[in-house]
Amino acid sequence: MKDGFGGDMKTQSGGGGGSQRRGGERRRKLHRVQHGQCSYTFILPEVEGCQVTSGGPVQYGSTNVVQRDAPPAAGEVTSTQKLHHLETAMENNTLWLQKLENYIQESIKTGMVQIQAHAVQNHTTTMLEIGANLLTQTAEQTRKLNIVEAKVMNQTSRIEIQLLENSLSTNKLEKELLMQTSEISKLRDKNSHLESKVQVLESRQQTELEGIKEEKEKLQDLVGKQMAAIAALERQLRAASNNNSVLQRQQQQLMKSIHTLVSLVSSGKGVVIKEQKFRDCAEAFKAGHNGSGVYHIYISNMTDPIKVFCDMETSGGGWTVFQRRINGSLDFQKSWKEYKLGFGDPRGEHWLGNEIVHQMTSQNQYSLRVELRDWEGHTAYSQYDKFQLAGERQHYRLSLMGYSGTTGQQSSLAPHGTSFSTRDSDNDNCLCKCALMLTGGWWFDACGLSNLNGMYYTLGHNIRKLNGIKWHHFRGPSYSLSSTTMMIRPVDF
């Protein structure tokens, strides 16, 4: 049989016979080691089987001896030689075992290296798979991030475009605001100049009115004296009726005097007629005054007469005008007190006064008519069957009933119960101050659908003006009208 190193291991028997050799072979112990494709078999001797006979050669009855590769020498073998042979065999076995152990260790090392390499390879494969999955996930996340980044960039570009557009519109608004400010300053200069002229005219009219009053008093005194003279002349005529010749001459003279006195009396009566007291333009119209113009009216609880413009032509006449805009010559950006007492000239642009309109509508039931004209020459009107203003404590609250007209199917005037507001007295229903935003004094509900006291814009500048003279259901919320008139008349006219 072969050892693990390619050599042949031979077993020889001692001086005994064939039966002893066969018995020894039966008592041998075979030891085999298998590793891989090679099989290794080795025989170990049993020491107790060795027997020495006295005076004779050593017998190897059942002893197994591992021999060298060369055959033993012929002849009788001594004990020393046998012992030497055994030691040599033991050394060979020991060397063989050491070689076998080294081989096994090397084989185990090689297997361990292969196992470790295989484990490393498996671990590396697993790590590569995990890395590939991570790379795939990273690529997917990167793709999603690129999509989100593209969306963010698009949104950012849109926002930048919107900001640019807002900046451009803001610049336009600032330019328009500067232009409007300059126009307002010009209008204020014109207004101050016109106010100075109006004050001069009012002072002149006041002087002329005082002179007329003095002449009236003188004429009334003269008429009284003339009437007394006429009565005395009549008595004289009756006393001198018997003297015909003298009386005829005196009668002719008296008739001349009477004609003169009658003419003077008639002129004195004309002055009285002009000073007839009317409560409104409707009474003046009924008294025979059918020409449109400025009249004096006397309102209850007011001692002095009030100058008003009477429209004696529109829809049957008899209208008392309390608001008119025709050319923008008057600034309507006034305070609460000015809107209360009134401002402007009744012959032109003016506001009669909230207190006067309150007193008038408290003495009788009135209807309201609003006349409108745009810059293209189109006219329209809104009429309300009943119109009244409450007192100052109620902020001149509006009371309306019964709408009709040609300015639209719905009324653009503030609803029933709306209070009047100015820049220094905010009484609207908005968190903002409508009188400051839309300018002027008006019945603002929540800034509302109308404002006839807004800024006056000329032709070409009257489009897209929210703070202009507007009437929503006629020309829209951002069209500033050319002229407006608000007037009242008794319901039973």
Image (cartoon, rainbow, N blue to C red):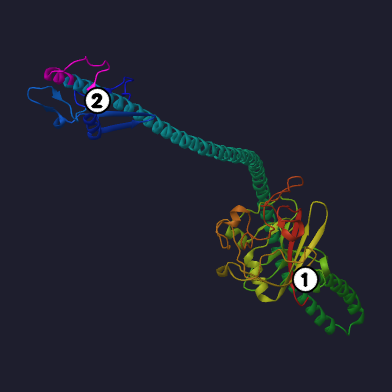
Up the image or down, 326 lies above or below 100; here it is below
Disc 2 marks which residue?
97
Does dot 2 land on a helix, a strand or a loop?
A: helix
Give the label, 1 or 2, closer to the camera.
2
Please report whichever mark, 1 or 2, sits nearer to the chain's N-terminal start.
Answer: 2
Quadrant of the drawing holding the N terminus: top left
Q: Which mark is residue 60?
A: none
Query: Which residue type carries mark 1?
Result: Ala
* Residue 276 seen in the current view: no
Q: Which mark is residue 284?
A: 1
Q: Nearer the viewer, residue 355 or 151?
A: 151
Quadrant of the drawing holding the C terminus: bottom right
Q: Is residue 213 left or right of residue 127?
A: right
Residue 7, given in percent of the width and then of the height, sits at 31, 19
Q: Is residue 94 left or right of residue 171?
A: left
Q: Find residue 373 and report its image quarter.
A: bottom right
Query: Which residue type carries mark 2?
Result: Leu
Up the image or down, 292 lies above or below 133; here it is below
Q: Nearer the viewer, residue 395 or 151?
A: 151
Q: Is residue 456 left or right of residue 3?
A: right
* Residue 138 seen in the current view: yes
Q: Nearer the viewer, residue 455 or 79?
A: 79
Write the residue at 27% across / 33% down: 30
The stretch in magenta equals 66-85
Does dot 1 land on a helix, a strand or a loop?
A: helix
Report the Cα–Cα distance between label 1 and label 2.
152 Å
Residue 42, given in percent of the width and then of the height, sits at 27, 28
